[in-house]
Each structure stands twice: as C-alpha cells, then as structure tokens.
Image (cartoon, rainbow, N blue to C red):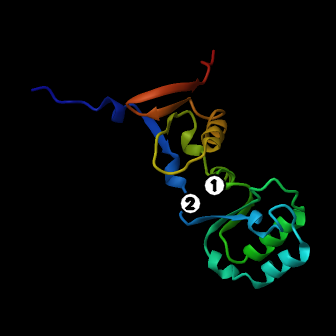
Amino acid sequence: MKEIINKVALSGIITIDLETFYPQGDRVVLDIKEHLFQGLILKEKDFREFVKNEDWSKYTDKYAALICSADAVVPTWAYMLLAIQLEPYVKRVVFGDLETLETILYNEILNKLNFDEYKDARVVIKGCGHLPVPKAAYVEITRLLRPIAKSVMYGEACSMVPLYKQPKQI
C-alpha cells in the first residue's frame, strides 16, 4: 500500500487565522437613545444626573461601544462624557456599533504584529470561522501582507482563493 503524503503540510504555506487574535471579553453597547427626553432631545441636566448616578463598575473588563440609535442630534460632549466615565473600567471604549468596535480592536492588534515571518512566504488567510471577525480585519491583514508576502490567499489550505502573487523579479 502506498503511503499517503500530505502535500498541503509540505507546501510551506503559512496559515493566519484571524480568530486567534480575537480579544476575549464581553461587548456592550451603550445607547444614548435610552437617555433622550421623548426619544428626541438630550437634556444636559438629566443626562448629567444619569452619568453621576450610574454604577460604571458594572462595565469592568468589558469592551464598550457608544451609539445613539435614535434619529436625534446628540452633542459630541455627551459621548465624551460617557467615555470619561467608562475609561477607568473598560478594556476599550469606542464611538460606533459593535462592528466598529471589532474593527478598531483588530486594527490595533494587527498593527502591533511582527510580520517578519511572512517575508517572501506563501500565506493563506483563513476564512469561515465562528467569531465575529469584521471584514475590515481581512482587508487590513491583506494590506499589511501585500508588500512582504510572496503570495496571499484566502480560505483553507485545501481550497484557497489566490489574491496576490508577487511579480517575478528579472
């Protein structure tokens, strides 16, 4: 009987699974809509009273996204005031929805990575996972790899979509 050879393992392809960089921790959305007068107007006095009385420690070690889901004009200082209160407790606070939060977290993580091991490498960026990795993270890792990798692919080692191949040097 002939020995089965795993050609994928011997190919030298390096797989990057963006899920391995997923920051663990609860995500919360703070919607200013809940603190608008008649769902339309932010009353400074009432809002400051909420900020003063809120137990901000309940957000300890969470990732927070600040939004207003109502069609209302919310002054910028309101988001800033929430950020000031949350900052001592949360791992990270951002303005935007959960996808914006995930995008910012991934951009911070990816831009701190050392890409030396990917120099002239054949790299496949693994897709189809279980965690909410934003599409922006795939774009960012591709942007970072393109100048250094020999080739960039997407998918699984057994079924890859080629995205980029370094031109041959003459």
Local SS, label 1: helix
Q: Looking at the picture, how far across and down is residue 99, in whole percent?
A: 65, 50
Look at mark 1 in the image and give the residue it sits on: 109
Q: Residues within 10 Å of mark 2 (few under 14, many from 20)?
A: few
Q: Amino acid at mark 1?
A: Ile
Residue 138 falls in image quadrant: top right
Q: Toward the viewer: 160 or 3? A: 160
Q: Are marks 1 and 2 in contact (CB under 8 Å)?
A: yes
Look at mark 2 in the image and give the residue it sits on: 23
Q: Which residue occupies the extreme top position in the image?
A: 170
Q: Toward the viewer: 157 or 65? A: 65
Residue 69 falls in image quadrant: bottom right
Q: Quadrant of the C terminus?
A: top right
Relative placement, left or right, of 81 versus 5 is right
Q: Looking at the picture, how far across and down is residue 56, in whole percent?
A: 70, 79
Q: Is residue 54 above or below residue 30?
A: below
Q: Toward the viewer: 71 or 125? A: 71
Relative placement, left or right, of 23 versus 104 is left
Local SS, label 2: loop
Q: Amino acid at mark 2?
A: Pro
Which residue corresponds to the image point at 63% horizontal and 53% vertical from the top-left? 102
Relative placement, left or right, of 54 versus 81 is left
Q: Which residue occupies the extreme left position in the image?
A: 1
